[in-house]
Image: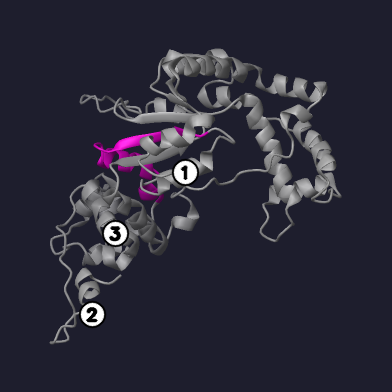
Amino acid sequence: MAFLIDSLIGNPVVRQDEKRLSIPKRPLPVRPRDFFELFAAMGANASPEGLVRGMDLKMADPRGIMFAVLERWPTSEELAAIEVPYRAPHHIRLLLRTPEFRTPIVRRLFEAFPERIRLLQVRMPRCAGEHALAMLAEKHPVLPLDLGTRPFREAAVLVPLLGALLSRFATSRTLVVVQPHIAAFLEPPAHRVTGDDPLHWDLAQPPCRAIDRLFAVIRPPEDILLSQANALLTALRAAASDDEPAAVTAEREHYGKLPAPDQAAQWKALGKRVLARVETRNPLCSALGDGTAEGALAVCARSPLELVGLHGYAEWARGAFDSAPPDPVNVSARILLREDLGPEDLAHLEALTSEDRVLYDRYARKSAAVGLANVKACEI
C-alpha cells in the first residue's frame, strides 16, 4: 500500500542514499497484551519475520519471553532445554506453534483486553447466523475457535491471520464470539488448582460480564425446521459439483433421481419426504437450556440474554453492530411452504417443536407488548 505522501504527489519518495527506511522497534513485550498489540500494529501485512523485527530483543531472556507469550513462567525442564546462546526469535516461533498458545486464544484475548465489550451470540440454526457473522466481520474482530487445530500450527499461517483479526481494533472497541449453546457464555471457566489456594486464585468469572452484550436471533420454531428442509432442497435442486459438501452428495444418493428444476409440485412432494426425516428437536430450548421450555426459561430468567426476532433483526443489528447490513447470505428457496403441509406433516412439526413453541410464544407476547423485535429474555 502506498504511503500517503506518495499518493498526494503522484510519485514514490526515494531516498538519495539508497539506504532502507528503518522501522521503529517496540519495547520488549512483558505481558500478553503487549505481545498481541504487535499483531494489531502489523495488521493484514503481519508476518513471522515482521513480528520479531518489530520487537527490541536486545535484553530478551527466555523467562520474560515465556511470560509475554504464554502468561506463565517456564518449568525447570523447559528452562534447561533452552539453547545457548539464547535465540529469542527462534524461541518465539516455537511458542507460537504450541497448542498452549493457540487453543485458548479466546480466553487469552478476553483477559488481555478486558476493557473491550464482548459481543456474544448464541447462534440458532437457520436464524441469520451467517448474515450476522458477515455483518460483524465488517468492523469487529470475530474470534476463531479452531486455532488449536493443525492447519494453524505454522507461524506463516497463524501470524497473518492474527494480524488481520486484531487490526480490527482500529475500527471497533469489541471482541466477538459465536457459540451454539448459551452455557459457554454463562458458566465460569474451569480453573484447576492443585493443593491449597491461599491467594484465592481459583477465579470464576464467566465470559459474559455485565458490560457485555449477549444475544440470540430467533424465529418461529416451525419456520426453523421448514428452512432446514428448504436449505437441503435448494442444494439438491442445484447442479452437482466436485466441491459439493459430502452431506449433500449423500442426500442425492438417498433420494435417487430428482425432479426437473421446473417441476414445482414434485419438489414440494420431495420436500415433505425431506421434512419427515428432519430430526432437529426444539432447537431454541436446546441452545438456551436443556431442551425443555422450563429449563430454557430458567436460564433466561438469570441471564442478560437479549432475544431478537428475525423479522426485525436487520434494523436492530444496524445499531447494535454499528454496521450496515450486507446482502442476505445462505438464503434457501421457499420451495416447501407451511400451507403445503398435510395433517401428518404438521403433527411431525408439532412433535419436534412443542417445547420451543412455549418459549417463542412467551417472546412473541412480550415483543408485541413493547413494540420491539428485541426484548430482554429475563422479562418474558
* Residue 109 % position (x, y): 31, 43
Q: Which region of the structure is painted magenta?
A: 99-123
| Camera sees residue 79 | yes
Q: Residues within 10 Å of mark 3 (few under 14, many from 20)?
A: some
Q: Earlier in the sequence, mark 2 or mark 1?
A: 2
Q: Which label sits in the foreground, 2 or 3?
A: 2
Residue placed most toward the observer, 99 or 51: 51
SS for dot 1: helix
Vertical order, 224 against 140 (above or below)? above
- The residue where tag 3 is placed is 92
Q: Earlier in the sequence, mark 2 or mark 3?
A: 2
| Amino acid bearing label 1 | Leu
Q: Residues within 10 Å of mark 1 (few under 14, many from 20)?
A: some
Label 2 to label 1, Cα distance in Å?
38 Å
- The residue where tag 1 is placed is 133
Residue displayed at 69% across by 39% down = 334
| Amino acid bearing label 3 | Ile
* Residue 376 % position (x, y): 41, 20
Label 3 to label 1, Cα distance in Å?
32 Å
Residue 12, labelled with which disc? 2
* Residue 330 % position (x, y): 59, 46
Q: Is residue 116 magenta?
A: yes
Q: Quadrant of the N terminus?
A: bottom left
